[in-house]
Structures are given as C-alpha cells and as structure tokens.
Image (cartoon, coloured by chain):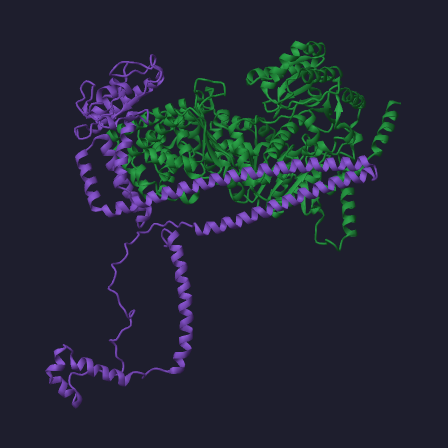
Chain colours: A purple, B green
Amino acid sequence: MSRAAQSKPAPAVKRPGGGGGSGGDAADGGRLHDDLSSLRVADPATESCPVCKSSRYLNANLRFLVNPECYHKMCESCVDRIFSHGPAQCPLPGCKRTLRKHRFRVQTFEDIKVEREVDIRKRVALVFNKREEDFEDLRAYNDYLNDVEDITFNLVEGIDVEKSNQRLESYRSLHADEIAANQHLAQEEKMSYKELQKQERQQAKLRREAAHREEEEERREAAETKRDMLNRLAMGTEDAETVAKEGQQVQLKRRMDRQAAAERQRQLQAASDMNNGSSNLVIKGLKSRKAPEPEAPIDPFGGLSFEGRQYYNLQDEYTWEVIQNPKKDKVVRAGGYDVMEQFGGRALCEAFSGLGVFVADETSEGVKGEQDERVAGTRRAEVGAKDVKMEDPF
Amino acid sequence: MKFFIGDLPVLFPYPRIYPEQYAYMCDLKRTLDSGGHCVLEMPSGTGKTVSLLSLIVAYQQFYPEHRKLIYCSRTMSEIEKALAELKALMKYRADQLGEVEDFRALGLTSRKNLCLHPSVKREKSGSVVDARCRSLTAGFVKEKKERGEDVELCVYHENLDLLEPHNLLPTGVWTLDGMARYGEQHKQCPYFTSRRMMPFCNVIIYSYHYLLDPKIAERVSKELSKDCIVVFDEAHNIDNVCIESLSIDLTEDSLRKAARGASNLERKISEMKDTDAQKLQNEYSKLVEGLQAADEARDEGAFMSNPALPDDLLKEAVPGNIRRAEHFTAFLKRFIEYLKTRMKVLHVISETPPSFLQHLKELTFIEKKPLRFCAERLTSLVRTLELSNIEDYQPLQEVASFATLVATYDTGFLLILEPYESDTATVPNPILHFTCLDAAIAIKPVLERFSSVIITSGTISPLEMYPKMLGFNTVVQESYAMTLARRSFLPMIVTRGSDQGSMSSGFQTRNDPSNVRNYGSLLVEYSKLTPDGIVVFFPSYLYMESIISMWQGMGILDQVWKNKLILVETPDSQETSLALETYRTACSNGRGAVLLCVARGKVSEGIDFDHHYGRTVLCIGVPFQYTESRILKARLEFLRETYRIRENDFLSFDAMRHCAQCLGRVLRGKDDYGIMVMADKRFAKKRNQLPKWISSALMESDSNMSVDQSVATAKKFLKTMSKPFPARMQDGVSTWSYEDLMQHKGKIDAERQLDGPMNGDADAYNMHGDQIMNEAQGADGMDVDADFDAAMNSMDV
C-alpha cells in the first residue's frame, strides 16, 4: 500500500481553513491514521515514492521530502524534477496546492500529523510566548497556558480555525512589544545555556584528565618506591625488615598526603562553586515585571524645593519706596520680570537666609551625611552589579 | 535464655547464644538508642535474623514508644524464613512471660502470591493478576455496582468492608501461608488485609521494593510513622536495587504500544464526552484547583503513582496546557513521536536530562514543567475514565514515568541510546536507557524519613563504601568475625597452577590453553578430594561456556566425570532449578556432583549449599562486571565525580562483594565446614577487601598457593574435619550458655571498674562489639587445638 493513500485522509479532514471538520471526524481520522501508522512501521524497507513509484528496495538511498503546505511525501528526485522550474502543483491526485521547491524539507517525525502539529505550534509559540514570571500567580499562568493550548488544539484539529487565527492575530497586534521582549529573553537564555553546557563539558574533561594523571602518578610512585626498596635491600647494609617497613610507611604517608590534598582541593572547589553560585543566582518569581515608569523631566536641583518658605510670606504690595519706582518704570518691566516676585522675593530671601541654621549641628551632620553618601554609593553600585544578573529581584 | 543488655531484658529463643550475636545485639541497641543509621556485617549462618528480631521485639515491648519494625528482605523465601523465625520467637516469649503479648506481625507480598479469587489466581503473570485484581476491586467499580450496573466484584475484597477497619485480623504473627489460610476461612482478601492492617502492626516484613521503589513506596509505605525501625537485610546489593528502581528502558516496541495506548485513551475520551461529559468536566475543575484535591480520591488500587516527585510539587496545580484530557493525550502522542524519532539515530548517544529537554523543547515545544506532571496526570485521567483493562496501558505508564523522572532530576541520571544490541549487529534494535547513576536518590527519602535505618548483610565489606554511595552517616559501623571452636572453613588463594604458570581470568590470558588447563586441573584435583558437592563460580556465562568447551577438548571433563556428576547453570531459571534439584539428589545419594555456575547468576545469591551440599567452592577468576557496558561506564564516571570513588576501587569492590557472596554459600552455620578457593592471581592483592570474617581466617601462608600446595592443605583440613566433633566442644567458646554470658559480663564490668574514672558514665552494654569479639577470640586461642586433640583421644577410648 502506498504511503500517500494512507496519509491522505488525515490532512484532508483537517485542512487548515476547512473549518467543516467536526470533532468526531477528527477523532476518526486520527484513529485511522494511527492504525495505519503501525502498519507502515512494519516494513520501512519497502517504502516507495507515491509519485514515481520507485521504492527503497531498488534504491537504498531514497530520501523522502515533505512540503508543509500539504504534507504529501515524495522522493527527492521527484521534487527536483517537478519543482526545479518554479512553483508547481502537487503531483498527487486530488491535491491542488501550489508548492515551491525551497519549502520542501526532510520529515522529522514519522507521524505526519505530529509533523504538522509541530509546525502549527511553532507558529503559535512565536506569538504566545509569555513566561511564568509575567504572571501574578500560578493560577493565572495556568489559565493562560490552557487558553493557548485551546487555540493550538483547535488549529491542529481544524475546529474553528478562522476564529482561532483571529485570536492569534489580535493577540499578536496587541502585545507586539511584549512578544518581542520575550523573544529576546528566550534567545538570551538559550545562548547562556549553551555557554554553560560548553563550560561544563570542558570542566568534566579536565576532571577526567586530572583523575587519569593522578592514577598515573600513583602507579609511577609505587614502582619507584619498590625499586628503591629493592636497591637498598640489594646493598645489604640495612636490615631487610626495617627497609620493608620503611617502604610501606613511605607509601602510606604519600597516599595520606595525596588524599589530604585531594580533600583540600575539593573544599576549595566547593567554596569557589558557592561563590559562583551566588553570582549566577537566578531568582525566578511569579511576579509581573512592571514596565519602567515614564521618565520625569530633569530637575537640576535634585528635588530641592523652594516653595515651602518657612519664615516669610511674599505679599503683593509693599510700601517700600525702592521698589515703587521700578514697578512703574517701563524700562525695568520691559525685560518681563515681575519686580515684586524677583526683586522683593530675593530681598526677603536674603534677609531671612540663615535663620534656622545651626552651625554646630550642620557641621556634625555634614560629616555623617558624607559618609552616608559614600555608603549609599557603594551600595548602589552593588545593587547595580547584581541587577545585571538577577532576573527579578522580587 | 533471658539476659539484659543495659536495662533492656532480651528473651532469646535458644538456650545458647553465639558471642557475635551478643555483640551484634549490643551494637543494634546502641544504634536504636542514639537514633541513627548503621551498617553491620555479620557472618552468614550465625543467626543474624533471629538476633535482630529478638532484640528489636524486646526493644519494642520494653520501651513505651513501641516503635514499629519494618523488616525488608530480598526474596520471598527470605521473607518467609524471617516470618517463621519471628513466629517461633513470639511463641517462646509467650511461654516465658506466661502471657500472650498484644502483638501483630505480618508479611506483604504481591497480589500474585496472595490472591484467593478463583479465576484471577490462576493467571501466570504478576502484572496480569494486578490488573485483573484492580478491575475487580477499584473504587469506581463498586460505585458502578451501587448504581445498579452489572459489574463483577471480588467477594474476598468486598467482605473486608464489612469488618472493622482496624481489626481485620486478630493479633499474632501471620506467615504468608497462614494469612492465605485465614483469608480462605473467613473469605477475606489476604492482600488487602495486610495492606490495610499495616498501620496497626508491630512488625511488617516485606520486600525492598515496597520501600525503595518510589512508585510503589508512595502507595504502600506512605503512612508509616517517622520513628519506625527500618532494617534492610541481605543488603549487599542495595545500591543496585536503588538504581534499578529508578531506571527505565524504552524500546521501539514499547513506544509503539504506548502510542497505541495513547490513541485508545483518546478514543475513550471522545466516547466519554458523548456519554458522560460531566465527569471529565469534574476532573478538569479539580485539576484547576491543584493536585491535592485530586489526591483525595487516591486509593490503594490506584493505577500508578508518581515516581519521586518532591512534596512541594504535589501541592502545585497541573500546568494549564495538559489540564484538558484531549490536550494531554495529544501531548503524550507528541512526546512518544519525539522519542520514536530519537530512536532512529544510528549511533550511540549519551546525554544528560537538561540537554535532552532542551532538544525536546526545540523540536516539539514541550516544556519541562508539564512533562514533570505527566505521571500524575495520567493516573488522574485513567481514574476518571474508569478504565478496567489497565494492563494495556503499562507501556504508556512507563513512558509517563520516564517523562516525569527526566524532567525532575538534572543530575544523577543519564540517557543512553544504543541503536545496536551488540557491536557486531547490523540490524538496529534501539534501546533508550534512562539510567539512574546515583543510588542515593532512591534511598534518600527512606533515610530522611526514618530515624533508624539498619543495613545489614553477611558480606557488606568494605563497610565505608555503602554510606559513601548511599549518601548517609552512620552511628555504628561494624563487622564481626566468626568465633569458632575449630577452624571450620579454609579460605585459600590459588595463584599458580602446578606448572607454576599463573592463573587468571584477566582478559589477555583467559583463553590461553595453559591457563585453562590449570583451572581444569584444579577442578579435577578438587573433584577427587572433596566429599559430596562442589560449587564452581565463573565470572560470566560467556566465559563459562568457552572454558567448558575447551575443557571438553582437553578431556578434563572426562576426568571430573569419573568422580562427580557435572551440572551447569543456565540463564533459564527452570533449567537451573532442575539442575539444582539433581545436584542435591546427587549430593545426598551418590558420590556428589559439581555445579558449574555464574557469580552473578541466580545460584550465587539466595541458594544455600549447607553441609554436604557444598564442601568446596571454587571461585574461578575475579567476577568483575562487564566493563565495556556504557551504563557501567557512566556510573563509574558519576561515582568518581560525585563521591570521589575511583573506577578501579568501585570495580574491585563490586567484584569482591560478589565473590564473598559466592564463598559464603558453603558455610551456613557453625557446625558446617567447607573449603573456599579463590583461583586467580589478582586475588592476592584484594585480600583486604574480603569481609572480616573471611579475611581473618585466611592465613598468610594460604594466600599465594599453587594448585598442588592447596590440594595438600585441603586434604589435611578435610582429615581434621572428618573427626567427630561433639557440640559440647563449642560450649563457652563459640556458643555461650547463660553462665558464660554472665561470666563475660562480669569480666567486662571488672575491666570497666579498672578504668572506671575514665568513662564512668558508659554503661556495660555500651561496650564495643569489637571488644566482645576479642574477648571471645581470646577465649578459644591456641590452647583449644591441644585440648581438642586430647578430648578426641579420650573419646576414642
């Protein structure tokens, strides 16, 4: 039985956009498909191309390709023959889809249904890529997952495809920024994971080599001690028993030394691991990551307020002749300054400045303040350094 | 015999006690008092079980806490032996105390062994019995019956519900047979009786797996309280049991079956949607709330349970994307399909769980978290669907537990894909081994939960290896020598043949004709001089076959044939048991027989060759593991990296513990005698890795012999052994009567008073086992031999 005839019913029932296939149909298709898939597995050697009918029996290097448009399988030479001059219709009877050569690829999964499902999932995962950390609690996250799965499942099984696609698109347009951000994060994570794996492999290799070396060393030493002992015995100047005993003791001592050294090494390593651990610490929490607040305009005085004047109130009128004249003088007012505000205010400010300042207190506070500043500065630096590593400091 | 250890009165059901038994009990009590774990090695055939039981039962009855004893053993026969010992002990206690204590003890074994249902018990396979039993006893079946549907129920199980739940069984010690008989009489199911009575027992005796295999342990042993005393007897293989309980092998066939199971589930779901959608909806809303709610429905008939999921996870809700039943089946199918794809690779792959998960995620968008809940979700689904033919879903369950394990543990596991069965095979038959490398993982919950865990065996040397591998600390760690009134076993290391050529099963020389001939002549000589049975152990089946065929060519078998019958162990257990039976008949009736078997086979463990069934054991070659196995290599690497155990150390430790097991087969008591020959030049260096009781009996002069020397020594030894040896010769030396014990105690007290101020607060019983042993050894000493000859002479007259 040719493969095409078997795998055809499945996509036919669940063709995206078909929309007509009800749940019952889908289940039927699935069952049929599965029964047949177990048949197909039975003899992979006689698999044959549904287009040119050449089989693996005749050509051992036969390779099959599928196109994610319709998932019909055909052999490599057929693909070359039919599609090398541009897009063409799928050569299988009943399938009217136009296929392009560059989209043909090797089938990853044996079950064509799963192959298609994974393609759909790829599409969905690109859009719905929220992470567990983006949610306030587990329940919300699980509900989100459930919704996503619903959409995916509907797409895969061909239930309400239009609606699901709509939901997908609307979500995409609504959350474009978030999607991009999470994509970036995922990318980063993957990179760092790969890096980590590489490091680990390297370390394992080093350790293996070290163990090898150690063993070698031990063997060499043992041989040396033995030779030495034999030499001394051969000289015959010493008592045989003491020589033998000494030799044993030397060996024992060496072994103890080596063990102690290994232990030390291990402790050192453990300590360094701990250090690494704390700096690599990744704390994941269920908490929404809030977008940073919109930046406020720059305040050159750093929040120092001139409003709350403690000791005086500026009044509208002062009977003070120094300002009576300029108040009316056109030349003075031409600059746009309010005489009362600028001049009067300044005069008052100067008059009262210094009240409420106690020099002794200020000097002692000043010293403390300086220190605080320094401490805060270093702390801020630390926090900054940690921030880089920490995904979410609660 | 009644005596005191400290303030604890111990009733010992025999009139005499061995010194090592007394030492063992002292150390046991020390462990129980201090509340920690211990490793004890006691020579085989010195009454380990009875001393263990009598001390612990005394401890239970004397102290007000009444700590429960969980006694785990390895095989059915050992469990039954222990139950019988306990029964005798309790009878003795009742006689002595004049009243029957309120005491309940029972054993638990599989449904297959206990089932009484007329048609179910006729099934041959254990898993079929389990499945059929579940379909007759599950909670939903009963509900159906109550609704008036026509379903079959098990009468034996139903009758249990009529009884008081805490009093299904009268007090007393129940052997497995006794339980079955009681069940038959009262028409109640013995299996569920024991399961339900476990919380109300003083002693429970069952197999390791009920405690170590997390899949079973969670269901069976969950309610045992924290202060239980846990004993692992015959525990020399405990690390392998731990590892096996967490390892999973997947083949193409099992994946195919799993896929079929998933499709069946899918169909069942759509059926249920048509008929009883409410039920699915109920399950769904339960899962939304979290697993804990779903847990309530968990009963003893549950389909399977989660392998080793941490507790905090169990409280978490199932991830949203596998909450719906149809989503979950699609999820499973995708996962299975992925595994199938992986199986197609034609070269060996070994990878860690994180890298597997990474690849899985890239290819199929399956995240780690839902994977982790796979097993639990499947259980819930199966329960909701009320499936009755559960055995069909076994492969699917395997895949689900694989998924859970791979997502739960980052380290300590490895995935190894072997596309070909052997190096020379050309047709791929892929197996995906998901192998556990760390024995500590499985036993960790046990060690953490129970305050006293006792690990004991006849051969568990070197003692420090076990705490290291299993990741725990011991309060007591002790190995006892064997006190003997005469040298009743003769260990020898034979390194050379009569031609002075070395003997070894090492890879380079194992098939040298001279080497094989030397081994052959060893066998011929011993078949001549040994009365009755000889047991020969080879390192592997492969080597045994090749050496036997070479012996056939050399005519060695013909020479052996003149003296003994020759029998061979095969991997087939039926054939082997036939061979064993014939062997026993031959030993009892004729000139005896030679049994050729394998050091890691069935015969090497659990089968005793006591008295005339085994007078000589020959260990041909050091029984190393097959070192080219990838799983072993991975484990060795893991041990080195994690526990700092060197490859060679572990391999030789493993070989020597198997060797010791083999040697221990022939000596099953103090009145037994036997010759133990280790024939390999490499044994000379491994002497100190033997258990203390063997290595202390191995004399320096016997540790590097040639075949003819060993034959001469063996002949002399047998001549001594053939003299009659009345039991009273052992009195006071290797067996103590009450007076001897008191005398010994008095001596200890006197010693203690001498250096009293030094450690005045220490009690007499606190004395170290070593001291006791030294004392006992000192008592026999050299003069016994002289005495003995004199005694023999007087007897002759």
The image shows residue A6, relative to residue A187, as above or below, that is above
Foreground residue, B257 or B29? B257
The image shows residue B488, relative to residue A279, as above or below, that is above
Foreground residue, B735 or B381? B381
Q: Residue at x 58, y 19 (%)?
A: B541
Q: Quadrant of the N terminus of chain B?
A: top right
Q: Is residue A182 found left or right of B178 in the rendered image?
A: left
**Percent x, y for residue B192?**
47, 31
**Percent x, y for residue A216?**
62, 36
**Percent x, y for residue A233?**
80, 36
Foreground residue, B734 or B630? B630
Q: Residue at x 69, y 47 (%)?
A: B766
Q: Is residue B90 found left or right of A86 in the rendered image?
A: right
**Percent x, y for residue B607?**
62, 23
Q: Quadrant of residue B367?
A: top left
Looking at the image, the residue that sits furthest to the front is: A331
Q: Is residue A270 found left or right of B755 in the rendered image?
A: left
